[in-house]
Image: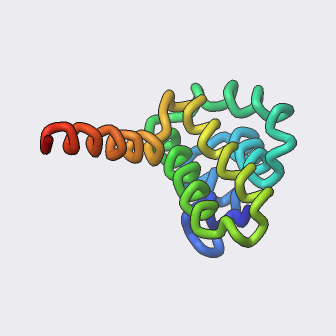
Amino acid sequence: MNEDIISGQKGTGLDEWAKKMKIDPLFAGSLAEAIDEPDETPYLLNAITDGFPGLGKNAKKEVRNALLRVQIFCSIHGNTDPIKISKQLFIAQTVERLLFGSNILMTEGMEEEEEEPRKSKTKK
């Protein structure tokens, strides 16, 4: 996965992003590797879950935004390498749920789906 997607800025490397956002470099590197190489995630999980609680509020917000950027990128580019992209999407969604307790993009979609049956029931 391109570091630009994780950092949200073209030409910004992972180390520069982590430093700017006050994100532990080990955490940032583990997160990036988990997304780039989804099959390695089980071996990186401890570094991700152990490093997250020590991040500040703004750093945690930036991590979530990075995970959202990855999910959006994967949804847009799903046809380029469907197997790898689907794994990367799964990892980004799973890590977001693991660290934050929910997935913003999935929650909003579920709320919209739940509203539709209610609307159809009230029209009858």
Give above or below for 103 relative to 1: above
- Determine the residue positioned at 72% across, 58% down: 85
- Determine the residue positioned at 36% across, 44% down: 113
State the residue in front, 96 or 81: 81
Q: Quadrant of the C terminus?
A: top left
Residue 11 picture location, percent across and down: 65, 74
Judged left or right of residue 86, residue 109 is left
Residue 21 picture location, percent across and down: 54, 50
Residue 81 picture location, percent across and down: 78, 66
- Determine the residue positioned at 69% across, 43% down: 91
Q: What scheme was used to colour the molecule?
A: rainbow
- The image quadrant of residue 51 is top right
State the residue in front, 19 or 117: 117
- The image quadrant of residue 10 is bottom right
How many numbered circles are shown? 0
Judged left or right of residue 33, residue 90 is left
Q: Residue furthest front?
A: 124
Residue 65 picture location, percent across and down: 50, 51
Judged left or right of residue 94, residue 47 is right
Give above or below for 118 relative to 50: below
- Determine the residue positioned at 77% across, 45% down: 34
Q: Residue furthest left?
A: 123
State the residue in front, 124 or 7: 124
Q: Quadrant of the N terminus?
A: bottom right
Give above or below for 38 relative to 49: below
